[in-house]
Structure formats: C-alpha cells, structure tokens
Image: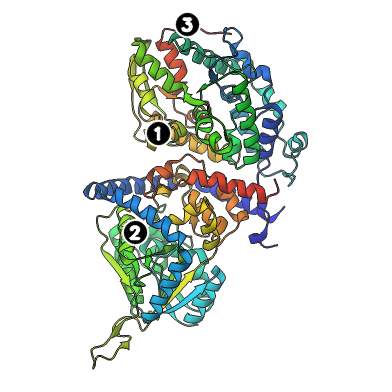
Amino acid sequence: MSEAKLLFQKYAERLLQAARDEGIFRAISKSVANWRERKAKALARFPDTVELAREVRRLKENSLERLDELVQQASRTLEENGAKVYQAASADEAREIIGQLIGTDKVVVAAKSITAEEVGLRPYIESLGNEFWETDVGEFIQQLRREKPMHYGLPSLHVTREEVAKVLTGSFGREILPEASAEVRAIREFLRSKYSKADVGISGCNVLAADTGSAILIENEGNIRAVTNAPLHILLVGIEKVVPTLHDAFKVAEVTWRYCGFTAPAYLDIISAPSATSDIEFNLVRGASGPLELHVVFLDGGRRTLAQNPLLKEALYCLRCGNCLLECPVFQLAAGYYGDHGHLGGIGAIWAAYVTGSLAEAAPLAYTCLRCGRCTEVCPLSIDTGRLIAELRHTIVGAAGG
Amino acid sequence: MSIEHAQPYVPPVLHVISANIAKWGNPLGLRKRDCTSWADSLQIPTEGSIILHTGCEYQLTPYVQPLRDVLKRVKFQDTLLSTTSVIQRITKTIGLDLTKIFAQVSKRERETFDRLLRMAALTLSKLGVNFAYLKEELYAGALLYEHGLFEEFERQAYRVAEQFRKAGATRIIALTPHAAETLQQVYPRFLSNFDFEVTTYVSVVADALARSGRRLSLSQPLSATLHDPCHLARSLNLTEEPRKVLRAIKNLELKEVASNRELTVCCGAPGELIYPELSELLASRRARELADTGAEAIITLCPFCYASLSQGARLSGTKVRVMDFIEVLYQALGGSDVRG
C-alpha cells in the first residue's frame, strides 16, 4: 500500500474512533455553549468590533501583498532594538536554530504556540536533553496526557474535569480533586516552581508590527508574562503575522481577543526588545530585570508559496481564534483528530498542504470537510473555507494524476 | 519516498462518480428513463422559457443509503488504480457494484421520490407558475465541483447549459439547493456566457403564494421542525422563504431548533462518499438535535438531507419522521394522491 494511502487510512480510523467517543461531543458541547455566550456578551458590549474585523481583513490582505518587505522591515527594526533575528525557511531550520540557542541541560518553559506545535518543537528540544514545560493550563494538561493540542484557544476542550483530576493525581503523586479550582491551583503551584528555575522561555505571538518591531501576545493566565521573563526569550513567529504598524497590530489583537469572548484580556504583552536600562550615566545596558536576550525566529515553512496562490492565500489571514473549529460539525464530534501538524479543521487542510506539510498529508483533511459553510458564518474575517477546500481538492486530484 | 513528496491518495469512488456523470449524465449511472419517468402522467411541455430543473437529485436519493452501506464495507480495500477511469475496472477493483445497489432499491422506494417530483410540478401548476421540463435531464455537477474535479465539472456544465439553450430557456427553477447554488454561483465562474436567471423552487412558491393569497391548511394537525439545508441557508440566503410558507399553513405548528437558519448544522450527507460512518454519526447527531424540539416531523428542502436525516433518525432511535417541504406544501394546497 502506498504511504499516502496508509496515512489516509490511519487518519480515517483515528477520526472515526474519536467521532464515536461520545465523551468528546459532550465535553465540547459544554465548551461551545460557554464560548458562544461569552463571545455574544463581549460583542454586545463592543459592537464596533464587527466593523473592525472587516478592516482587519483588508489589513491582512494588504500586509500579505507586502510580505517580504514587511518581514525585512520588522527584522531590521528588531535588530536595532537589540534583538537577534533569524530567518527559518523550514520547520527543520526553525528547530535547529532554536535547538542551538538552547543547547542541553536547560529548563525550558513555553507559552502556547501553534507555530511551535507546527514545527514539532517540544519533542525536539526534549530529545536534546532539556526539561520542557508547557505553561498554558490546557496545553499543560495535554502534555501530561501525551496528546496534541485539540484547539487553538482551548487545547484540552475535549477533556472532562474528572479526566483532568486523574492525570494530575497520577503525575503529581497526590490526590487532586475533580474540581476545576483545585486542579488549576495544583497546576499553578507546579508551574510557578518551574518559572523561577527556567533558563529559556519560548513563545509565539498573535501579531507583530513591522514599524516598531513589537510583538503582541494576548493572554489571561499570566503564564506568558512569566515565560517571556526568562533570562533568554525565544520568539517564534510565522511570517504571515507581520502587519505594517503597531496601530494595525492593536486592531488585529483587539479583534482576536473579542472574538475569543473577551471584552479585554487580563494581560497584553508587547515585546519589542530584550530588557535594558540606561539609568547609570545614561549608558544603555542590555539585560535588566527581564530577559538578557531576545531571539526572534521568523518562519516561512511554506507561507511564501501559499501567499503566491491567488485564492488559497486567504487561509493565511487566519487569526487562530478557533471559532470555525468550535462550530464545525465534524470538529464537534472528533475534536483535533480532525487535523495534522497542529493544523486543525477545514482551514487546517489548506495549511497542512502548504505550511509544514504536504498534499499527501492534507488530502485526508481536505476530504473530511463537509463544505457546509458554518465556519465562514462565524469567522471574524469571513474566510471562505468551503471554496478554498474545493480549490485544494482540485490541486490534490491534479497531483494524484487525474 | 518521504511523505512530503508522495503523490496524494484520492479515494477511487470519486472516479466512479465522475465516470458515471461523463457517461450517463448523473453520479450513479441512472438511465434516462429513471430520471424522467416521474413526469409521464403529467402533461408538462419539454420546451419553454422557464425550465424546472430537478438535476436528477430526487431520482438519486433512494440509492444514497445502499451506496453508503456498500462504501462502509469497501473501506480501503481498493488497489491504487485510481488513475484509470474505466468504470468497470474500478467497479471491480473496489467492489462497488452499482447494479447490485440498484437491485436493492425497490420500486416502492423509487416511487416515493418520483411522487415528490410530481408534487413539486403540481404545486407550481396550482400556484399558476408555467414551466417546462427537459426530456433528458442531467445532474448539475455539484459533486464534481465540490471534490475538485474541475475539468469534469466544466464539461458537465457545458452540456447542461447547451440543454437549457436548446430548450429555449431564459429562466431556471432549480428544485434543489445544491443544483441552485451550482447553477447560480458556480457555473458563471466556469462558463463565459451562462446568462440564465436561476431561481429556486422555494422562493418561486413563496412568491406565488404571497401573490395568490391562497389559504394553506393541513387536514391533520402536525408539529414540525425545519432543518435548513446548509447551501440553501448560507449560500442562497433562503431562510425566511420556507418559514413564510410553513407559518401560513393552518394546523402546522413550527418548532424551531436552536441551531437554525445561518447556523444550521450539516446533515452529514456530504461525507458519505469518503467517510460513510462519520456521515452517519453526523446524521444521527443532527436528527437527535431536531427531534429534541419535540416535533413529530423534520421538514427539509434537500433530497440528500432527507436521505441522511432519515437514516440518522433510524440510527438514533428517535420517533421523528422526515418530510420534504414539497409534500407538506402539496398537502396544504389540498392535493390528492399523485401515483404515476
């Protein structure tokens, strides 16, 4: 049997097994109900966000047209700010760059990053002999469960609190009650003991401004502030995240958090440089209380090729808010088993085809999409995934030889 | 060879569908008579400026579940011969024997859907809408487009457009959402001069009813919920038209499901060719959700939703029955039996 067919078959088996597991549907249904209610409230308080989302769509369209120019400008600015900048053509290159920066025998803490998941960062850094901890609560649960993240914003949305208690009790060696508050407290204690020991912090970002070199990271848990305060901070950025100005970046960020159901996030981290002080005779010294070094890795990984595709480039506008996944009928039954390389759902099929993936890997995802259009209905940028899927399937059929 | 450079795998069932459309004009290779015999007892002209286009979809509906059952058994047991389009060879290779599927479907089951087609024609007539139908009707090709078989789709679109032209059509009444969306929104992207006005059955009857002021009433009380077909609600934006008609029917109580209109949930039918089991799980879930409104019946406006939700209702053990909008309207107009 061909490798591509085997891949298809294995995926189909996993997908079906997940879809048959009624626990996943029950758990997701609860998350979906809560998410919808919170999002409706946030949008009711800030109704202008809908218009702002339209503006952000145009902004993403224009930014992608100027992709190379903006990445160059951002890189230059970040260097001027005192950061070290790297250009990774592929996932392999990104892993190697980051691996060399970290070395071995380090304690690494990481904020949830879809891009890190895309390049398979954690297993690689662990294989170099480092201790690596995910610090987003959902992602941490998934790490302990030895499972991949199941959703962009809610990585463990298919796991009930009883299952969380079970895995925490097993990992911490003491009984953790199946109550969300007790579980979060136990995770908090564990993670806080790691932040103080961390040598390296790794994060992604939601958007990056080319003019000031500022990355914006949206968060509520406070883990990103801790992670990005480690002595060495590595920022991994997909090049599609770059927009012209800091003002633009704010617009992207606001639409992102609002469509995730927040009037305002607890914290907004804006990072443009490593920490520094000029307090002694106004001499600039890098490394004050915060990180000594900031390393920014820009990842192509196929994004430039995708950006050249007149129709499919629309997939790169994605803000990763995850509304499409929560409202997708297949995702509601099978969670992130409808995905590959951290690319999830119908839009994930487009990413899997071009960004750190291949047509062979994307095919089973592409054929999973029902083209029902529910995702487009809830997407802040109205990405027409159904149309993209038809186009991707056309490419797949062509590559398969008719 | 690494997976990055491997040729992608495309399930060969797509080539069976495609070969059938090329040869017979529809995905399952129904013969001309199977597609048009529903109209035998009606005197509908075969040429005219307004064409009722069934797209063979209702005619295909009785075969949907037998096909899904076969595909569930076949799984991945094909050898990788998907590049050939010789239909018999593929049929043999993947065990997809269409004649067997046809044999399973009784005349009675086929008659159910032929009756719906006659009811569709009769409701239009009762409401004063004049129309013709095509003696050799073709499937509009939605499956080809949806599965990325664009070259095959374009050929089919060309054939369909030629038929419309020959019949002297200016306006098409598409009976089903898939055909309506395909003709109205996809054809113009593939054909340079597809200048027919495409409308849908439900909007035509809604308009005609509003003009005629006819009273609608069912002889027996019925509580029903409406399942908005995805493409009708989201691509064609027809969410109010069916409700206007149904709300006007005396003795019909409409119970809305929370996920309705633009947020309607897929019936599972689009997955049936590649992931038949998943398709059934989706159908069960949607049928249960609709049945939970407490309605006795689910009303839908798409034959594939009809087939999928019927199976979903069976599998989820709900008592709810599935009805087509056409038959509800027909009964509400006081229609009598319409055997062929």
Label 2: which residue? A252
Visible residue check, residue A177: no
Look at label 2 and name its amino acid.
Val
Q: Is residue B167 left or right of residue A195?
A: right
Q: Quadrant of the rendered structure where residue B92 is?
A: top right
> Is B195 rendered above or below residue B42?
below
- Residue drawn 67% across the image and 16% down it: B33
Q: Could you tell me which quadrant the C terminus of chain A lies in?
A: top right
Residue B320 rendering spot, x and y as whole percentages: 43, 24
What residue does disc 3 label?
Answer: B336
* Whether marks 3 and 1 lie on the same chain: yes
Marks 2 and 3 share the same chain:
no
**Measured from the top left, where is residue B80 in percent x and y?**
73, 47
Of badges 1 and 2, the one in the foreground is 2
Q: Mark 2 lies on which chain?
A: A
Residue bearing the label numbered 1? B289
Q: In this view, does A104 lie above or below B43?
A: below
The residue located at (23%, 93%) in the rendering is A281
Q: Which of these two is toward me, A300 or A337? A: A300
Identify residue type, mark 3. Answer: Ser
